[in-house]
Image: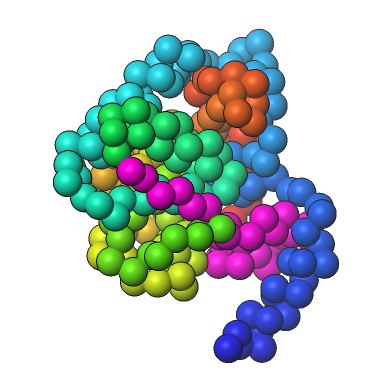
Amino acid sequence: MLQSGRLCLLLRLVKLSGQIDIDAPEYGGISSRVPSPPVSHRQLLDENGVYRCLDQIASEIHRAWPQEPKLALVGIYRRGVPFSESLATRLRAMGREVELGRIDITQYRDDLNSFTVLPRLEGSDIRFQLDDAVVILCDEVIYTARTCRAALEELLGFGRPRCVELAVLVDRVGRQMPFQANYVGISVELPPDERVNVCFSAVDGRDEVFVSSWDVKPS
């Protein structure tokens, strides 16, 4: 049963779920809608670079779990979802059977009290048996790892996986939680006033990773 505080929070989220905010930089600095890159943007990966990273990560997962019958990829909303779907497509092309799920971390964010407009509540979607499965959480960027902490808490509410790993397209230096990715496309170190933007053709019409400026909120 949900505690009264959690229930009140959930009701607030449902009531305001039609409103969209911009994600805080503590969660990687990724907005709900990636803007078209400004003229001065610095590209980290073009379309071919994104494809190479996806191919590399999928191959590493395949080698790490060659005979695993209960392999699942779970994408973290928002762009962890198209990321996980792209990896699943590659793994299935290798002859692997892969389950797909989605995780919404909204209820477990540790910065909800700082919002004047609450994030959209998408809802998690896991339609397979999680118990004893090998689950790979997928997110486009890991930075402070607060998203990972929230995602793991939400995931474990669905069952008891045998193993949970993490795959990211971009590993950004700056941990505030003790999480590290098992599968990484590229690693970057950036100043606090810059953010990583990840685009996937499924939601953005293009595949690209670039850096842009970010107005850091005072702590």
Classify the position of the C terminus by image quarter.
bottom right
Is 135 drawn above or below residue 189 in the view shown?
A: below
Q: Which residue is at the front of the view, 138 or 189?
A: 138
Q: Nearer the viewer, residue 38 or 35?
A: 35
| Side of 82 relative to 16 (left or right) | left
Residue 123 visible in the shown view: yes
Give how far across and how far down residue 211 sits, in percent. 53, 24
At x 60% / y 28%, what residue is drawn? Answer: 202
Q: Is residue 82 left or right of residue 118?
A: left
Quadrant showing the N terminus = bottom right
In this rendering, the answer to whether 175 lies above or below 214 is below
Q: Position of residue 13 (x, y in %)?
A: 74, 66
Does 152 appear in magenta? no
Q: Is residue 111 magenta?
A: yes
Measured as percent of width and height from the top left, residue 131 is found at 33, 69
Query: In this picture, which residue range is highlighted in magenta?
Result: 97-124
> Observer-nearest residue: 101 or 31?
101
